[in-house]
Image (cartoon, helix red, strand yellow):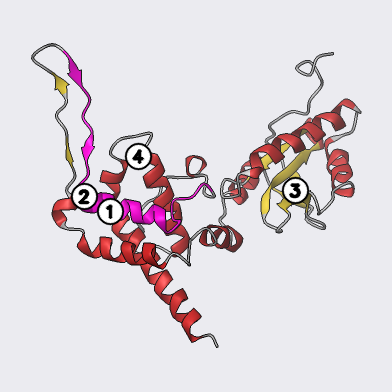
Amino acid sequence: MSRADAPRYRSTTDGPVHFLAVANARGEEMGYLWADDEVDAAGWCLRPAGDRARFGEGLAWSAKLAEAKARGLVPTAALAELARGSDPRCVSHVVPGSLATAPSLGALTALAQVVTEADDRRLLAQLDLGNTGAWRELGEALAALTDEDRDVRWSASGRQPDGTRLMGYPIHSERLRRLVGALAAVGAVTPAYLWQDNPPPALPAGGRLGPADAVRAATAVVRGERFCDGTIAQAVGTGLLDAVAESLCAWYAAVDGRSREDP
């Protein structure tokens, strides 16, 4: 029997599910293993805010579920077996004592969307505190940005007299490019945040961002420009890019101040 023809648990259910939390070696939750015996269903529910390793680890846990199905285990028995055989020294492991019940798979998926303090700490750890020059550049670039810089113009587009068609692109000023470059230099544009798997950033009603959310927004905006022209222009037009830089500068000033006070 080929792998494609091998028996598998159902991948969906409308009923309650039992689930186990799976964490990395630092104790941060990467996703959940779930099961429903009533419809012979089981699977992996990833956490979008988790680290990059969750993709590969999710495939590995899914493969273990498939092996359990091939041996005839009911879904909850498969979860119990995976919990017993889990090693906390591995890249990922079942969190001891984490067995719980969710009213539905949708409820578990909603739980997986919750951002934790550990998620925030992981992103803030990517910031380069030691690069004082880059942080100074970020503050100066923000102060130098003008309303004219924020009003991003686009190049000509449309059909030309010779019949060719031009695609327009945003024309960023030198000062705006300086600010974007400074965000990358301080470590705010990071592969540690999986921006494509998370909702697009938005400026809160109060206009202020927490530092971890600033890293999320910086990464999504700067990386997003590579895939969609105008992402940076939209962010600077709404005030999101200013809020990102202001939040990060305030965070750095506070952290740097505390470090100077330490004996």
As drawn, the residue found furthest toward the left would be 161
| Residue that label 3 marks | 92
Which labelled disc corresponds to residue 178?
1
Q: Earlier in the sequence, mark 3 or mark 4?
A: 3
Kindly state the secondary structure of the residue where label 1 is placed.
helix
Determine whether the residue tagged by mark 4 lies in a helix, strand or loop: loop
Q: CA distance from mark 1 to mark 2?
A: 6 Å
Asked which quadrant contains residue 168, the reply is top left
Could you say which disc has been placed on residue 174 in the image?
A: 2
Q: Crowdedness of circle 4 by 10 Å Cα count: few (<14), some, many (20+)? A: some
Distance of mark 3 from mark 4, alpha carbons?
33 Å
User: Is 95 inside the magenta-drawn segment?
Assistant: no
Residue sitting at 29 percent across and 55 percent down? 179
Look at the numbered disc 2 and give the secondary structure of its residue.
helix
Q: Amino acid at mark 1?
A: Arg
In the rendered structure, find residue 225 and report the number of the disc placed on it: 4
Q: Quadrant of residue 253?
A: bottom left
Q: Which residues are magenta?
A: 164-191
Examine the rendering and report whether any part of residue 206 can be seen.
no
Distance in Å between CA atoms under marks 4 and 1: 15 Å
The residue nearer to you, when weighing 36 against 54, is: 54
Looking at this view, is 113 or 143 the one in front? 143
Q: Are marks 3 and 1 in contact (CB under 8 Å)?
A: no
Query: What amino acid type is highlighted by mark number 3?
Result: Ser
Question: Tag 3's secondary structure?
Answer: strand
Residue kind at label 4, given as amino acid type: Glu
| Residue 118 in picture, x, y percent from top left | 61, 61
- When the figure is inspected, residue 146 is found, relative to residue 235, above or below; the finding is below
Q: Nearer the viewer, mark 3 or mark 1?
A: 1
- Does the CB distance between marks 2 and 3 fall below 8 Å? no
